[in-house]
Image: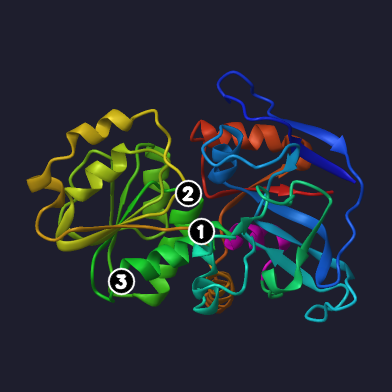
Amino acid sequence: MKAMVLNAICDLRKNRTPLELVDMPKPEPGEREILVKVNACGVCHTELDEIEGRTPPPEFPVVLGHEVVGKVEEAGSLANRFKIGDRAGIAWIFSSCRKCKFCLSGNENLCQDFKATGRDANGGYAQYMIVQEDFAYLIPDIFSDIEAAPLLCAGAIGYRSLKLSGLKNGQNLGLTGFGASAHLVLKMVRHKYPDTNVYVFARNEKERIFAKELGAVWAGDTEETSPIKLDSIIDTTPVWKPIVEAMKNLEPGGKLVINAIRKEEIDKEYLLKLNYPTHLWMEKEIKSVANVASEDVSEFIKLAAEIPIKPEVQEYSLREANKALLELKEQKIRGAKVLKID
């Protein structure tokens, strides 16, 4: 099978082709695994974190990609949740121990044995991949493969972020950064919380225009002050500056939810501007999002089908994976980027 593999950690400013197109053996499913013929795989900022070493894979070479949609081609002898030909989705959560207190309470995302698709196991930048059947999700017919792929991470992690924000209908929500995840959060909010106004902070003018097209009542630069104080803000950026800037726009008792696996170090000195009275006082909260649980993925897919949420996508071939990653690195974003696997 064809696959785009990462052979080593590298600096994307110096190596603009971190992934190599190779031939690999087609994987064989174990007893409780399914073999998925991949049709589409989303491109996520977490892949940049893997390539540049902020959340490094434990072994190389590795196939990246954790927003995977394809058809079940084979099933192990004890796998019975899917029929051959079913469309299956695979998300960031590849497996967990299934025994610890976190797994037993539905929070496998906090499991010490959490394994990530496309980091700890080969992912979807390939023609085939395998996964345990319990960590795959049936894709509703309402979505095409390309539409469904971003829902499995950008959508699911956005859904978890929204849950953790504690937002109630009629309260005001801020989104700082407006890429794949944030634009899906905005669509969710418009359905679940019709009386809530959304305010968007983005450094790119095209992103601000896009946010207003999708229903944001206001969109400004990262450093701007929102017209009103906000009850919750979700940060979807890879850097520190938006966090500090967002805190000044929160209501007393407001909550900032940080939707990121890792933060880049390029502007870490911005934290020195953190001022207790301005940014933290009055019982403001900061909450991080750690991975996603299986429940987040399954609940969000159901919600997305009900609304329905159709993400804005830019399509690339498997061979163009490096191009898609570089555009993501350079903030050339409108919606989500997806590889169409031939």
Q: Nearer the viewer, residue 206 or 323?
A: 323
Label pair 2/1, CB-CB below 8 angstroms? yes
Give the left or right position of residue 226, taking residue 318 as reference.
Answer: left
How many numbered marks, from 0 up? 3
Which residue is under mark 2? Answer: 261
- As drawn, which residue projects farthest toward the front? 100
The residue that label 3 is drawn on is 166
Tell me the kind of residue under disc 3.
Answer: Gly
Up the image or down, 336 lies above or below 168; here it is above
Disc 1 designates what residue? 291
Residue at the image point whose x is 47% and y is 49% from the top:
261
Tell me the element at label 1.
Answer: loop
Q: Is residue 230 visible?
A: yes
Magenta stretch prevailing secondary structure: helix
Q: Is residue 58 above or below residue 97?
A: above
- The residue carrying pointer 3 sits among few (fewer than 14), some (14 to 19) or many (20 or more) residues within 10 Å by Cα, namely few
Of the two numbered discs 1 and 3 on the same chain, state the one appearing first in sequence: 3
